[in-house]
Image (cartoon, helix red, strand yellow):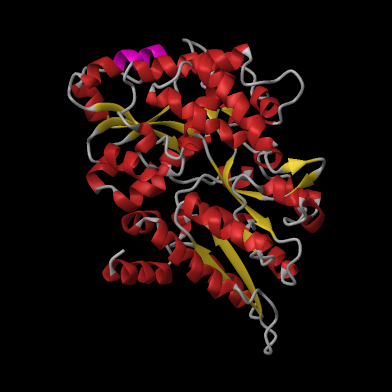
Amino acid sequence: MHDTDTRAAAEAIGRGISRRTLFRYGGAGVASVALAELLAACSSGSSASSSGTTTVRMWSWYTGQRDVFPKVIAAFEKKHPNIKIQNRIFGTPDQYLPALTAAVSGGDVPEIFAPHVRAITYGEQGISADLRKELGSGFFKDFFSSNNQEYTKNGKQYALGFMAQTFGLFYDPDMLSAAGVDGEPETWDDLIAAAAKIDATGKSTVAFSANPTTSALDFFLPLITQVTDDPTYYLKLDQLEKGYAYTNKPVLEALQLNDRIVKAGVFQKGTTGTSGDQATQLFYTGGAAMLFAGSWIPQSLAQDAPKAFLDKYKIMRTPAIKSGARHWTADQAGAGWAVSATSKAKDAAIEFLKFMYEPAQYSQLMNDSLSMPSTKSAADRVSDPHIKLMTSWLPDGCPHIPFGAGSSAAGDPLGKIFDQTASPAEVAKQMQAAVLNAKG
């Protein structure tokens, strides 16, 4: 890496690494620099200083809130002058997870951290605190049940939902009209028919990122619910309960549907080599008529897309498996907060979470960052029309996050469907083997 790149990366680390910045300077060298800098800055841990001030470290990759967190923190510190919040936002989960893993291995976990898919694992290992014990069961009554369920096992809850999410098809109505597509496709068959018309214009139909391949699960897993019409099916498959396997008929049928969608040219070529940011950019720069993604996209578009585009794009539901069927869509909290069970500053961390989730405070934080809230009271106060629309789809939400031991390993074989290098039957067997192998 050139010296100029090293200096630029160091400056980026000092500012707080955004997704786009770290991709721009990317590579293992920069990732190592970023990790070393961040861990060195936090290596002393959190403790009360000689002046009686307690520092609470908060780690995440939540770049969508980078402009609003300082306001919340300032308000909290004004009310609690003896507690200081040290907020660090990494880039994507791929850059964040190595830092978190290193902190866990070193026994110096930040007081508040984004647990990704490891909340339950860390909870069972004594790393994440049981928040039902720390906050009381009444604290959780306002949260959507799906956001509580994903972080709960055996009556203990190891994280709080921060941003809920649903998925859908973001689209450019002008591009659909120019291709002769009339209205919003209701079913996958309708979308496949629309793809033939859009492809004829020289544009991609749906921009999509299957990179990393775990992102491919965001698209595929809800297809299992569409096939079964049972939102609990994947929850059982995720835990590999007795009688549930990736080689079962419902999973194979979902893989066959996924395969048919890919074969029809619905997505741009090279989905497994396309990052989330690249797929979004392909959409708002006119390279694709649609984008399959989640409810964090309005905040990304607001930061990056031209105003003219912001004024015209629309969002439609995830297509249904057949006309009149339910439009099952991926939900659950895509972002959450866990608390270190062993930190001396745990009580201060809990105090900050209580403050951040006060109804008026949390609602404003979500609205200011164009985010979908995890609580019912905040959902009632959503102001952005796009987020409000996607929030209304929560009753048709279904699980799509692999929390089970080894479950995320299913993503690599699934990538072969998007690359068209293996058949659905072959992929089903490989998914089962990969999960069992990763589970150990």
Question: Which of the 4 image quadrants contains residue 339?
Answer: bottom right
Decide which of 37, 192 is in the foreground and name it.
Answer: 37
Residue 160: horizontal and vertical position, in percent? 66, 50
> Residue at image x 65%, y 33%?
437
Q: Is residue 15 left or right of 124 when viewed as pictured?
A: left
Q: Residue at coordinates 82% horizontally, 42% vertically from top-left?
A: 155
Residue 399: name its quadrant: top right
Image point (48%, 71%), residue name: 37
Report the span colored magenta: 186-194
Q: Is residue 112 left or right of residue 279?
A: right
x, y percent for residue 416: 44, 25
User: For residue 253, what is the image quadrant?
Assistant: top right
Q: Quadrant of the N terminus?
A: bottom left
**What is the residue that sits farthest to the bottom in this orientation?**
50
Between residues 316 and 251, which one lies in front from this camera angle? 251
Q: Is residue 349 above or below residue 142?
A: below
Asked if residue 364 shows in the view, the reply is: no
Residue 434 spot, x, y in % from top left: 60, 30
* Image quarter hosting the C terminus: top right
- For this rendering, which residue is in front, 349 or 26? 26
Name the residue located 66 percent from the left edge and 82 percent from the top edge: 53
Residue 358, x across and y down, in percent: 64, 58
